Amino acid sequence: MSGKNINNKKYVIISGLDLKDNNRGTAALGYGSFCFLKEKGYLKDDDIVVIFKYYNNFLKKENTSGKEYFVECDGKQVKCKEIPVFRIEKKLLDKFGILLPFTRFGRIVSNLRWVAAINGGDGFSDIYSTPTFLSRLHETNIAMKYHVPVIILPQTIGPFKEQANRDIANKILRYASKIFLRDDKFVEEFKEMGLKYEITKDLSAYMKPQPFDIDILPNAVGINVSGLTYSNTFRTLSGQFSTYPYLIKAIIKYFQSQNVPVYLIPHSYNYHQPEESNDDMIVIRDLYGKLEDNTNIYVVDRDLISPQVKYVISQMQFFIGTRMHANFAAIYTGVPLFGLAYSYKFQGAFEANGIYDSTAMINNIDEKACDAIVKKIADKYSESCVEKA
């Protein structure tokens, strides 16, 4: 690494930054990270946030050209720069620790002030599979190889099923200069390792809703239906949610019985190229087509960016979400809610925000358990109506 003073280095990395990610929650982390880092003093006005774009064919002009754009944060524009990198350079670095100092990639790595790691908000874990966990660590590994400070942005840490993954995680956590958490689910492990941490809000709290032209009926209830759980074929979570379609239909029937308008809201989807086993829009359309009665049911069938989805959720009187960040959109806009959980991250995140007894695990449950969950949702909904009155 260059001997240049770290405070004079102008490049920073927000790992996994993708404001157009299919998962609007992951994109929301990106939007929110700018304002969070500004607030904490880690992002200066003249900093450049770099995003490495790896390519194989250098003969294609679109591969070797990078984009520049700006993200608004607290009334100021933060410059972002996409940096094309020949994939061979990445392999040299990953496998042999070789950084070519005369390339643009090499010069930028030598002038990184820090790397801030998002890890998808809950991806610092092998809950979704070991390859998924490891795939989120590229920029962090660059930082560790070249002695660049790492900031762990607010997220859920763990759980880990494989000891090898836990060992990798521990090494990164011990290296990190600053660790932020969004819940307390891993704090005992931090205490055992003697590591300091700070609990704060999820990054999506810092992303403001963006109003747009949509009409929402009064007293509406929003339901986020997850393609991950509805398809029941997603990676290591496959086969755990056979009753999920029954549960969602039962929830819908309850609110229809109350003559309440229901909006089915996707939160992770690609409007043009759906992701197999994980696309909310595809399963919402399928669900809507299979309902015996569509009275008072509305599908938010539009290609929205994260701040717009947050706006839709903010207009609900009550919300039920399966995607964690769909729930965060409700939490941080003051909408009463209930979480359909498939990980301990839900309970931890809810309780970290002062919301108790408003989640239920949906892994491997039968129809009787589903009916009990609907009853619990009905009770929470009634409580919210009383409080509003």
Image: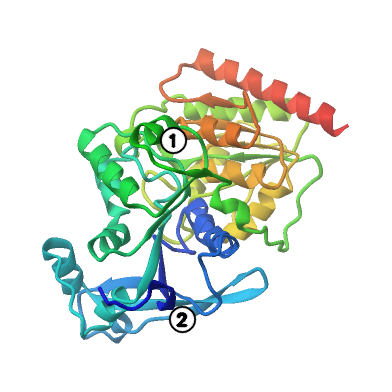
Q: Residues within 10 Å of mark 2 (few under 14, many from 20)?
A: few
Give the residue furthest to the top: 368
Query: Image height check: is 361 above or below 138?
Result: above
**Type of residue at label 2?**
Glu
Give the residue furthest to the left: 96
Q: Residues within 10 Å of mark 1 (few under 14, many from 20)?
A: many
Query: Image height check: is 351 above or below 204?
Result: above
Front position in the image: 67 or 102:
102
Q: Identify the residue shown where x is 28% and y is 40%.
A: 129
Q: Is residue 112 visible?
A: yes
| Circle 2 or circle 1, nearest the eye | 2
Cα gap from disc 2 to disc 1, whole angstroms: 37 Å
Front position in the image: 40 or 50:
40
Tell me the residue that label 1 is attached to.
229
The spot of residue 145 in percent (x, y) is: 23, 62
Position of the N terminus by quadrant: bottom left
Q: Identify the residue shown where x is 30% and y is 43%.
A: 169
Task: Look at the numbered disc 2 and give the secondary structure of its residue.
Answer: strand
Tell me the residue that label 2 is attached to.
68
Give the residue furthest to the right: 389
